[in-house]
Amino acid sequence: MYSSQFLSSVFSFLVLLPVLANAHTCTEDFLTEVGRINITQNCNLKTLQAEFAWNFDNVSRQLEIAFGAKLDTETGWLAWGLNPEAPRMVGTRALIGIKHPNGSLEVNKYSITAFTKLRCPLLPTDNIGLDVRNLSFDYLLNIKYYMIRATILLPKEYNYSSANIVWQIGEAATDRVPFMHPRSLKNFDSAETIDLVSHQVISYHAHPRSRLRMVHGILSIVGWGTLLPVGVIVARYFRKFPQEWSWWFKFHVSCQITGYSLGAIGWGLGLWLGAKSKHYSFHTHRILGIFIFTFTTIQMMALRLKPKRLDEYRIYWNMYHHFLGYAMLVLISVNIFQGIKILEPKPDHVWKWAYIGLLGALGGAVLVLEAYTWLKFWVEKSRKKETIRKEEKPKSEDANNADQPISEGKKNAGGGHTSGGSAVQPRP
């Protein structure tokens, strides 16, 4: 009962943690920059480390926007747009600023269609159905941001109380044609529906999914990537040698059951997220996850299907159980790195380095315990050899002492015969 309550509490905390950490206010530096151009009504921090500030007059339907982000690559592009139908890429009327390799900047208007999704070249056009004025694309040296700025007269078919905003960042372009953006989750999540007057987010489907992805990652790292290895370490080093611990088996089983339960919940959540993802699929991560769940389930069946200690097949079962367990640990680490690569964009490596630190701690513990095991083994082996040598030395001395009177007797007997002559004289 207590274990189920503990798992429930941990799961609830993991679900709420990303929600509590989810902030949407702009940075002070960006607020200072947009304040200089009098765009001060609203400002939100978006995915891809982008920031969006705007003023809106619902009487004249005039929308002033400032959209900024960093472009760390030599060539790159920044896009912001409105979609009259839904918060998605297809159908978006976009403003795209391009940074060329020589440092020059240009900005144009684009209409995103279904052909764009099919990798057809995206060409600029003036007819996007929006009255765009004062369009510019600049580099803000103070904060190292590139910023699109424009004034838009919002047509009546655009509902300002539920405006569909779409944004994107890409890393390659040729002339005025931007190439496909990176296929990370955050790139696909860059759309939302907001109220331009109250700046309230009406619909942001990526937010709950983003939280669930974080929960999926945390459960997998804690369950598969932490508790299972800890259980293996305890079984290897605290069963009999180098340190015997009477509670090792209970601790080992507890770690494996808890780790398997958390990992299985994370795996099921990952399958659900994959089924709900219409625009992307990560086949390697998915297949590795299915393999891990399948074979860890087989490992957990050892609690019931393990042969008896005196069974002739027990030695072969031990070999299989140990080999499969170690193989699963390697596969789990590989798949966690795969998941981190999907979850994190290139500039951020918080999850990656956190997991590397965790692996370093586990690996360090293994190295210390392994070194202690071999040191204790050689010390005990040396002591055993010394004990055997000491025990054999008295035996050899006793044997020598036992043999010596016999040899002396033989010598004395032989000497009497030669020196004293024979008592019986031969007959003539």
Image (spheres, rainbow, N blue to C red):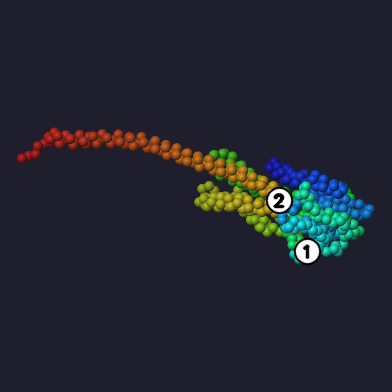
Residue type (three-letter) at the residue carrying disc 2: Pro
State the image coordinates of residue 387 (x, y, percent, origin top left). 42, 36
Q: Which residue is mark 2?
A: 347
| Element type at mark 2 | loop
Residue at image position (80%, 44%) is 28
Q: Which residue is mark 1?
A: 122
Above or below: residue 161 compared with residue 408: below
Q: Is residue 53 left or right of residue 118?
A: right
Q: Across the whole image, how many numbered discs are drawn on residues?
A: 2
Depth order, front residue of 166/270: 166
Residue at image position (12%, 36%) is 422
Above or below: residue 107 compared with residue 261: below
Q: Is residue 188 visible?
A: no
Q: What whole-number distance in Å separates the C-alpha atoms at marks 2 and 1?
A: 26 Å
Depth order, front residue of 54/163: 54
Give the number of the disc on residue 67: none
Q: Which residue is situated farthest in the right direction here?
A: 59
Residue at image position (52%, 52%) is 316
Disc 1: CA contacts within 10 A as few (<14), some (14-19) or many (>=20): some
Disc 2: CA contacts within 10 A as few (<14), some (14-19) or many (>=20): few
Q: Is residue 319 visible?
A: yes
Where is the C terminus found, in terms of image quarters? top left
State the image coordinates of residue 188 (x, y, percent, origin top left). 76, 56
- Between disc 2 and disc 1, whose residue precedes? 1
